[in-house]
Amino acid sequence: MSLARLPSSVANLIVSAEPAFTALTAYLLLGERLVPVQIVGAVAIMAGVVLLRLHVAAEGPAER
Amino acid sequence: MSSASTPLPSRARAGGYAVALCAAAILSTTAIFIRYLSVTYHLPALVLALWRDIFVVITLAPILTLVRPALVRVSRPFLPYLGLYGLVLAAFNALWTLSVALNGAAAATVLVYSSGAFTVVLGRLVLRERLNWAKAAAVVLSLGGCVLVSDALNPAAWRANVAGIATGVLSGLSYAVYSLMGRSASQRGIDPWTTLLYIFGFASIILFGCNLVPGGFSRAPPPDPASFSGLDDRSPVGAFSFFFPPGPRSRASVYTS
């Protein structure tokens, strides 16, 4: 449904928020807490994911 | 479907953002639900992985049979490839479910997102794909983040949770292989729905076999007392999570399309 209203690159980027939702829900429901070093690592991984997806979007379908 | 040349009204785009955010929120419940079941009921990871795959098959098979029966049939030459793909899916599901049980829902979900970096590395090594600065930077960021999230720089973590570190990293790697095989299946001309049905079917058979092995494979991980701190019976997470194929099905569209 979101792909019908947004470019796929934008929709994919938004869906990349899944780990953030998981971390929040895990904190609220399961009491899980990421320590600071894990939060830094999580931000690094997500930065890598965003960089890759932006790169794929910029290069267009030919690259994919 | 919209086309790039016809901009949608801002209201429709706002709706698109809301739907995408809802999709991310729904996807995130899979790990939460698995963690809840494994910690509360001590269900073994391989049993959970098996039932997830079975639910996908028993949901998808009747729908496809009724709506588009042609998609249920597949050419015999494709079966070995789909069988191998099912094996990779079974490995990924087992590793990720085990990672959720050992590392927690949040860390396991973050770790599996390192698959993008593994996909770039495998694409370079196996498919000889071009590696530019953006991909290289993404690999460094993702793998470096992987080390930090799994606490792999801490010798004590290796002693206490070597299985957690291994399953977390291997879940990312196996998902990368899964993504590349999805791309290959698409290039072979197999319909994505047919692929989905068959690989989940093969994965169910493989995981069923693994669960029959006496001893080691299907044991529940030892409960982690710290993880019980905020756990109670108030979880509103719905059982519908189980009926979704694993999270990566949507992520795969990025790396395999």
Image (cartoon, rainbow, N blue to C red):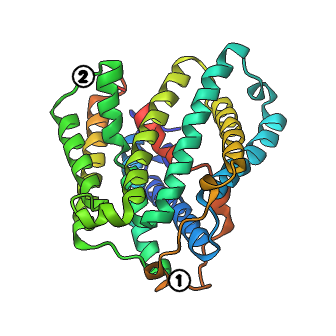
Question: For this view, does B162 lie left or right of residue B48?
Answer: left
Q: Mark 2 Cα within 10 Å, few/some/many (few <14, many 20+)?
A: few
Q: Is residue B196 visible?
A: yes
- Chain letter of the residue beneath label 2 in the structure image: B
What's the distance in space between the residues labelled 2 and 1, CA to CA? 47 Å
Question: For this view, does B189 lie left or right of residue B79?
Answer: left
Can you name the residue that lies furthest to the left here?
Answer: B133
Can you name the residue that lies furthest to the front here?
Answer: B215
- Report the front residue among B73 and B92: B92
Q: Is residue B24 visible?
A: no
Q: Amino acid at mark 2?
A: Arg
Quick one: quadrant of the C terminus of chain A?
Answer: top left
The answer to whether B37 is drawn above or below residue B78 in the figure is: below
Q: Answer with mark 2 or mark 1, whichever residue precedes in sequence.
A: 2
Q: Mark 1 Cα within 10 Å, few/some/many (few <14, many 20+)?
A: some
The image position of residue B147, as x and y in percent, is 25, 54
- Chain letter of the residue beneath label 1 in the structure image: B
Task: Indicate the quadrant where residue B116 lies.
Answer: top left
- Report the front residue among A45 and B102: B102
The image position of residue A13, as x and y in percent, is 36, 49
List the residue tagged with mark 1: B231
List the residue tagged with mark 2: B130
Q: Secondary structure at mark 1?
A: loop
The image position of residue B178, as x and y in percent, is 49, 35
Q: Nearer the viewer, mark 2 or mark 1?
A: 1
Q: Residue at x 68, y 35 (%)?
A: B202
Q: Secondary structure at mark 2?
A: loop
Task: Indicate the quadrant where residue B69 lies.
Answer: top right
- Report the front residue among B115 and B14: B115
